[in-house]
């Protein structure tokens, strides 16, 4: 059985309209939500051991805040999580080394919502900022993870879990 997390970057700042999309930073709310959601995941007993992040500033900063809560995890930038398609993302998951137990992938909408909804289980109209999608696969190897043997088992969103 394989487990993985999809995480949308925390709320980004829009106060500099001339800034390239890849360079947009986190907003104050994003700076609060990211460590909160990382702690929430830790309190659920999720032990993230590898973090793969889009190279976009807002996604990577979100991933770094999770990395502070999971300091033994390895942190990587993956271009496909910014520019890639759902097929690229699935291939990336299928290429995860077998020694990785719980990877988390940090990325962007709309692809993260489309990707989450491609798996079995409940769907969502939108993965909100800093939302975490928890997936479970009956596959015994990462290379066998697919839409047909993997399901969404939970969604965790800052507004919902803070209540």
Image: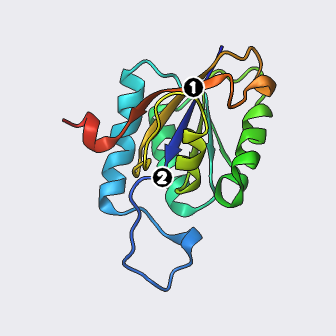
Disc 1 residue crowd, few under 14, some 14–19, many 20+, Cα 10 Å: many
The quarter of the displayed image where residue 100 is located: top right
Which image quadrant: the N terminus? top right
Q: Residue at x 55, y 40 (%)?
A: 117
Percent x, y for residue 104? 58, 36
- Against 10, residue 23 (above or below) is below
Question: Would residue 162 be found to the left or right of residue 50 on screen?
Answer: left
Q: Which residue is mark 2?
A: 9
Residue 80 in percent (x, y) is at 72, 53
Looking at the image, which residue is at 42% across and 81% down? 16
Provide the residue designation for mark 1. 151
Q: Is residue 146 above or below residue 160?
A: above
- Image quarter (top left, top right, bottom left or bottom right) of the C terminus: top left
The label on residue 121 is none
Q: Nearer the viewer, residue 41 or 143?
A: 143
Query: Residue at coordinates 53% horizontally, 55% vertically from top-left?
Result: 59
Question: 11 or 28, which lies in front?
Answer: 11
């Amino acid at each position: 059985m394989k487990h993985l997390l999809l995480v949308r970057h925390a709320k980004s700042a829009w106060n500099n309209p001339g800034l390239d999309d890849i360079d947009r930073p986190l907003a104050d709310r994003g700076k609060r939500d990211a460590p909160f959601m990382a702690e929430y995941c830790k309190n659920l007993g999720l032990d993230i051991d590898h973090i793969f992040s889009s190279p976009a500033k807002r996604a990577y900063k979100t991933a770094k805040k999770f990395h502070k809560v999971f300091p033994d995890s390895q942190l990587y930038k993956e271009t496909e999580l910014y520019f890639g398609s759902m097929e690229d993302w699935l291939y990336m998951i299928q290429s995860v080394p077998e020694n990785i137990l719980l990877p988390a992938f940090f990325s962007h909408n709309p692809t993260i919502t489309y990707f989450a909804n491609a798996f079995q289980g409940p769907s969502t109209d939108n993965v909100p900022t800093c939302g975490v999608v928890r997936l479970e696969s009956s596959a015994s190897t990462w290379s066998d993870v697919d839409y047909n043997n993997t399901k969404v088992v939970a969604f965790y969103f800052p507004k919902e879990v803070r209540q």
